[in-house]
Amino acid sequence: MQIQDLPYPDPGVPDARSGPRFLWWLGRNQLGGQFKSLAWGLLHFVSVSALPFCVGFAVQAVVDRSGSRLALTGGLMVLCGAGIAVGDTFLHRAAVTNWITAAARVQQLLARQAAHLGSALTRRVAAGEVVAVSTGDVEKIGWFVEALSRFLAAALTIVIVCVGLFVYQPALGVVVAVGVPLLAVSVLPLLPRATRRADVQREKAGRATELASDTVAGLRVLRGIGGEELFLDRYRRASQEVRHAAVRSARMWAVISAIQVLMPGLLLIAIVWHGVRLAREGRITVGELVTVYSAVMVMSYPLRHFEEIAMAYSFSRPSAKRAAHVLSLERVTDTGGTRAAEAPAGDLYDPDTGLLAPSGRLTAVVCGDPDAAGRLAERLGGHPAEEGVSVLLDGVPLDELPLDSARTAVLVQDKDPVLLSGSLRELLDVPSSGAVGAEEALAAAQCGDVLVALVQGSLDTEDPMDARITERGRSLSGGQRQRLALARSLITDPEVLVLDEPTSAVDSHTEARIADGVRELRTGRTTVMFTSSPLLLDHADRVVLVHEGAVVAVGAHRELLRSEPRYRAVVTRETEEESASRDEQAVPRSELGSRDAPLRGAAEHDEGPLRGASDDDDASLRGSLDDETALRSALEEIEESA
């Protein structure tokens, strides 16, 4: 795999049982790149290590006054120089390719997992942790995969040099053969402590990243409640903890680096001391002493890769563990399904709550708990994040259909839809039936002012469809983002459309027009709308009240408002004290006699003048009878004056 071939057609199925297993799986899937890096690394390191032998031969040729051997040695040095240059160039190329392709594979796996899990991902793993895994952790994992082949090349080179020195000069070669392995293992006792400190640093850095990500995501809310300083102080403390952990980790790695300098120095001293004695005794030549000394000195270069691989593994192991944790998550349902792919059409029924959405009608669902409403909306789409009874569409369990078929039949728009960056045309370019055009959907969602705002914010286009939308639509208001998301959902024209609070961020006038537009555009299609807005509820064909996980009332909005206290409490935001006071006032009202009879008739039938009030008050009240909340307030004021 080359960089220009990315992304992978299929990144594969990872071994996510543990961090080390995941790293091993990545290495096995890059054997071609690893062997290339190993081959170029051997060429580079062997060429570097061969220079001391050339220098020794050259010195000995000068001592022996041999011009032919000196010329031959010069040729060998030129050949070694070429090997160093070519090997280093292609080693770097192969290593960077391994790094980037490994990181790209991990990112593709994470992206595929995020798309596979959907909302279940952020319910099981913090959003900040997902960000940390897909950014910093990916780089550290790629670093280890890239460093592995270079380490193997360095280790093989050291073995080759030690064997060559032992054959070339056994008296000094045996010292090198014993001393170099001791150099390689001299830092092993310190590695567990360094690894633990690196783990602590990585954990604290991950927490700081999570805190920063969550703070940025909720910045508008924090500004609204004045909580910026509180979260800023939290991040400062987390940042300082990361700094202290990084300093402690750096101290340990500094000690390891010092040992990597000290031990080769001691070995050189031992070799020079022993070599001088042998040279004075005439057992070795000056050229041989220079060769062995130069070889040991140059050997410190490949030995450095022992420190690098230890550091790379220490930092990549916790990162791989976090990535493996995310990749090991599974959906509670089989996305492949147990039935053949089909797109059923009919009534939507949830056996768990008893919610029924008749085919071709607009059903509004009122639920006092927003979190419960979100979970119910997700379950209606099939293949939910939490295990439970499957929702039925025309009697067919959605969880038994393939995920693609379930999503085609039922589309769920949650209360916080995401707008991807790009042009408006690209945003609305979604799979659809083709029956609803972009212009119709934008009109139904009342996006006229949004189109104007997009054109005004674009300097190089006059067509709103070509206007750019920033990341997550941050340049737009909350209501504008919500209406664009609604238009995108309407374009898909699914058999069943589930909307969770689609107008919570718009004003009442726009909300009324949206209600008319959605009702008209979705005629003949099944629409389920989770809302507590009286304007939307009054446009629904039927309203369902879900209380404590079960359907407790079904009817029209006005009917439920009069007859169901729990429904009235959710829709009008009536408190328990207000409800109790209202019930207490109902008894005296029945004892008011004939003077209150017309009043009761007006309350029950939305008609008739109110006695005991002036003509202006009566006309005003009759003009606002469509607003049930205003009617109740007026009745209570008249009763108090009576």
Image (cartoon, rainbow, N blue to C red):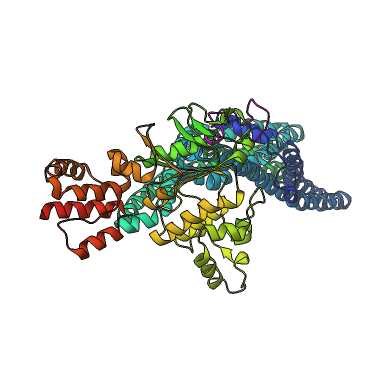
The quarter of the displayed image where residue 425 is located = bottom right
Residue found at x 60% / y 32%: 22
Q: Main secondary structure of the magenta part?
A: loop
Residue found at x 11% / y 55%: 641
- Residue 354 lies left or right of residue 227; in this view the side is right
Query: Residue 179: in sight, yes or no?
Result: no
Task: Give the percent coordinates (x, y) of residue 264.
Answer: 58, 41
Residue found at x 47% / y 39%: 377
Task: Give the percent coordinates (x, y) of residue 149.
Answer: 68, 39
The quarter of the displayed image where residue 465 is located = bottom right
Task: Give the percent coordinates (x, y) of residue 161.
Answer: 72, 37
Q: Is residue 175 magenta?
A: no
The range drawn in magenta is 322-343
Which of 356 and 258 lies nearest the eye of the viewer? 356
- Residue 290 lies left or right of residue 22; in this view the side is right
- Residue 208 lies left or right of residue 484; in this view the side is left
Q: Is residue 340 above or below residue 472?
A: above
Which of 228 and 528 lies nearest the eye of the viewer? 528
Query: Residue 60: in sight, yes or no?
Result: yes
Q: Is residue 305 above or below residue 342?
A: below
